[in-house]
Each structure stands twice: as structure tokens, then as C-alpha cells.
Image (tube, rainbow, N blue to C red):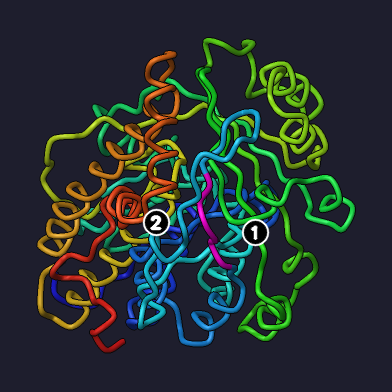
Amino acid sequence: MTRSPHVIVIGGGIGGLCLAQGLRKAGVSVAVYERDVAPASRWEGYRIHVNPAGARSLAACLPEDLWQAFLASTGPGGDFGFLTEKLDELLVVEEPIMYPAAADPTEGHYAADRATLRRLLLAGLDDVVRFGAEFVRYEHAPDGRVEAVFADGSRAQGDLLVGADGVASRVRGQYLPHARVTDAGAVGIAHKTWLTHETENWLPERLRTGMNLVMADQPCFLFTSVFQPTPGAATALTGADGITESAGRDRPYVLGALVADPSHLPAGLTSMDGDALRDVVDATLSGWHPALRRLLAESDPDSRAAISFRASEPVAPWPATNVTLLGDAVHAMPPIGGLGGNTALRDAHSLCLALAEVARGERDLLTAVAVFEERMRDYGYAAVRDALAQKDRGLSTGTVRTGVQRAFMRLCSMVEPLRRHAFADQWDGPSRPLPWEPTATTPR
């Protein structure tokens, strides 16, 4: 097929919506089917670090007004501190070392609120996104087109079906039934503590600044980060196409994410309510600094959530068809370092580029899908490996290992060239642009 395709996207997360925005911008027909009944019908997460791969993808796929709204709604990442559980400062890596200033904003780093990002990606897609559409299966019509079947009996037909339906993807279950998503050996408990004048009175300055990794000789670690949107972010979002609600979008908070070996925690963690999670976390951190315990104990109860980390095992190449996958549906990974969200955005950008070639008559559909999948498997499974490696390093224990690690960080703190050598350009996993991806020097 060389005519412009009609694309069906199953799943309205950030990957599926970024794809929809990009296809619409490229003039490719698209429809998104999301099982949630409304945009805010479920908890949508916390702060997310958007790295250059994610920024390039958003810049390429979003219309200019929404790209500018994204820039206006994000906050600075800040320095990265390494602390002990007693809040002894081992090392602070300056932001310019981690994230060198980019001449073009499409090559930058951003701290974004995930819920705000999803709302922004929904802007202007009222006629594209259908909520309350629970995907059940797909079938192939006699003419070879693909047809999605939904729980209410409705159907939708298109030239390509894209499974962007997350780690429990039903599309993947039918299309690649041999693909395995396994337990990653970690659980995360996230908290959101509103950053108010009262909070600032007792919260140590380091925890009110940038990002921090708190490490103990225990099978757990705590990541904290401050989300501080730029002044006027709510106003900028209110003026963006389709975004009318701005309440709370410029409210700062501290994210606290405890990652732990589940064998050291009570069973049934993911089904516990906020109060029960608070008690589990407080017991786990019983020997930690009081400010760390208070930060988590006084978090918003409605924001506390536990999730078992999952990871996709690499799948051998499969023949391209008019069904494909992106994001966690094909390369699920622990939510560490923002790699999962950025890789989903990269998938959306890559697939959009491939399908735009089909629309222009430069490639047939199956060749375009094959090219996308070959690239996606390469960087996607590399991101899974990187996220798992970060998880393993964080959960490692041992007196000798802990002592060596802390001594090295203290040395880096004293020797700037060593600090720069050890930590520059090490924060984004496999996010560097590939030859087929536009970069800051490529006109948008």
C-alpha cells in the first residue's frame, strides 16, 4: 500500500498521544481508542525527566503552540545530589555537568509533570481520541485491513493498528504471544509532598533542590526531586489549544520514590491504601534521618502508590505486518531515570517519520513498519537493559561495596575533573540521535 494510511492507535498514554499529534501534523489520518472514560479518570503519575530524545520527539510531533506550551510548563532539573540515609552529603553533581546547555531547546532536558504532559498531548485531539473504548482483540478484514473490536461490540477499521496499551498490552498478547514481561525484582512506592512555606520550614535545603539519590546499605534507595514549574506556566497552558483547566498546574512539590527489593517488604503492597503504605515505608526507613521519614510520612495520602516493576525480555525479530507496538507494550522497563517515557516518545517520533513516508508515496506500509521495528528493537531493548542495570546498582548491598562507593563519591566531590569525567553525559541511557532522526541542526 502506497496511499496515505488510516492509523488506529490503541491506548491514550503519552506514547500513543504523541504519535497521534505527529501523524495529524503530517496529514496522516489517525484515531486513538482509550479505555479510560475521561482524561482524569485515573492517577497519572509524578514528575518525569524529559531527556533530549524525548524533547526531539515532542518538538517534531507537536504543533508549535503546544511545543511552546510544553516549554512554558516545565521546570529546571537542577543539580543531582548523592546522600546517605543520615543526610550526609557525599557529592553534588552540577547541572551543567549532567546536562550541558543546549543551543536549541529541542536538545534540552526538562522536568515535566506527567499529568500535565498528558493533558497537553490531548489538546486539539477531541475529534481523534475516543474514551471509554476497551480494546478486546483485532481481526483482519477480507481486503487485508485490520479491524479493532471493543468490549461494547463496536469496531474500527484501519490500515495499521498500533498497540500503545502499556505493559499489560492486549495487542501484544495477541500479536506476539511469546513475548514475555517478567518481574524485575523491585517495587516502587511513590509520594508527592506539596512544597509549601510550612514544608520549607522543616525540609533541609538539599531536599528542596534539584534531584537526590539517598543510599543506605540496605536493599532499597530513595530518589527525590523537586518539581518547580516556571512562573506563569498555568497561564501559558490555559492559552494553549484545547487546554482550559489550569488549577494546580503551577503548584510545586517534592517527589519521593522509594525503590526496594520486594522480598524485604510485606506481601500485597500494591493493593495497600495510602495509610498502609505510609506505615510500611516508615518501618523500612526506621533508622534514616527524621526529615526523610517526615517527607514521606507527610506526603499527600492520595498520591501514595506502589507498583511492581516489570521488564520485557528481548524478542527476536518478527516479520512486519499491519499491526505494530510502541512504548511499554513492547519494551517495558522499570520507571527509573525516565527512560520508559522518553523511549515511548521516541517510538512515536520514529513511527511518525516512517508513516509520513508512506503518505508521501516514498515507501509502502509494510516496509515502513519493518524499518520502524528494526530501529525500535535496537534502542528500546537497550533502554530496558540500562534501566535494569540502574535498578541493580541501586539495590546492591554490602559493607565493602558501600564503603568504596561512598569514598569514590567523596573523591569526586573534591576533584572537579574526576567528577566531570565520571558523571558527564551518563544520565539518559541510549538517547543519542540516530542518523534518521532530526537533531537541533535539522529544520523543524
Q: Residues within 10 Å of mark 1 (few under 14, many from 20)?
A: many
| Residue 215 screen position, x and y as percent | 53, 30
Span of residues in magenta: 76-81
Q: Which residue is mark 1?
A: 227
Q: Which residue is mark 2?
A: 342
| Residue 118 screen position, x and y as percent | 57, 62
Helix, strand or loop: magenta stretch: loop
> Counting residues from the N terminus, which is met first, the one under dot 1 or under dot 2?
1
| Residue 152 screen position, x and y as percent | 57, 46
Residue 336 placement, left or right of 444: right
State yes or no: residue 394 in magenta: no
Asked whether residue 326 is in view, the answer is no
In the rendered image, the vertical position of residue 133 relative to residue 409, given as above or below: below
Q: Quadrant of the N terminus?
A: bottom left
Asked whether residue 127 is in view, the answer is yes
Circle 1 or circle 2, nearest the eye: 1
